Amino acid sequence: MMSPTRKIRTLSRRSLDISLLFATLAISSLMLGRPATAQEPSSITVEAITVEPATPGPDTLCKLTVKLANGGDRTASQLDFKVKINDQELPVYKNQLFMFPLPAGETVEIPLYNFWSTETSRPPPSDGKLGIEVTLAAAQWMEIKTEDGVEVWRPLGSVEGLPISKTLALSMSQ
């Protein structure tokens, strides 16, 4: 039977070996130029958020559009948006992907879901400002081509540097 002191030394030695392994992996990652905590800037940017009408009143149906620019060299799609109105996330975006193509080197306006300026769960803001935040949480690089008369979309991997956000503050009319 192993003595308690011997058992503790054995566990400590294993812990040290595991720690050394992780340290070696971290140093190797840095030497390859891929630090684990650094986030590359995204090739896609949120250029603008547009809301119509520009000064909505209470209980107004608003049209929401986002303008995205693709500075990458491939088409992007499978756009996963998150939208907040006065810091409340709109639930309609939880399980939705927008399958609009965002071609390389182009800027595209994408219509998002309409929303009400106020709702039962979201009364008019006391300061008269309607805060809108649009986040592109995720997207995929895509190859889109026609094969035998059929358009085929093939995902090539996640767009790096996401999520990205833009905010807009609107003054509400009475």
Image (cartoon, rainbow, N blue to C red):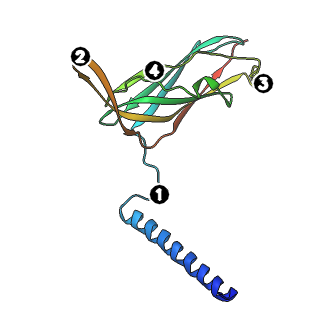
The percent position of residue 55, horizontal first and vertical second, equals 63, 15
Does the CB distance between marks 1 and 3 fall below 8 Å? no
What secondary structure is marked by label 4?
A: strand
Q: CA distance from mark 3 to mark 2?
A: 56 Å
Name which residue lies at 64% across and 83% down: 7
Q: CA distance from mark 2 to mark 1?
A: 43 Å
What residue sits right under mark 2 in the picture?
Answer: 149
* Dot placed on the residue nearer the N-terminal end, 4 or 1: 1
Going by the numbered disc 1, the residue's amino acid type is: Ala
Quarter of image, res 145: top left
Name which residue lies at 50% across and 56% down: 37
* Dot placed on the residue nearer the N-terminal end, 1 or 3: 1
Residue placed most toward the observer, 48 or 141: 141
Residue placed most toward the observer, 157 or 108: 157
What residue sits right under mark 3 in the picture?
Answer: 126
What secondary structure is marked by label 3?
A: loop
Looking at the image, residue 174 sits to the left or right of residue 146; the answer is right
The percent position of residue 89, horizontal first and vertical second, equals 65, 29
The tag on residue 110 is: 4
Looking at the image, residue 9 sits to the left or right of residue 42; the answer is right
Quarter of image, res 100: top left
* Dot placed on the residue nearer the N-terminal end, 2 or 1: 1
Does the CB distance between marks 4 and 1 fall below 8 Å? no
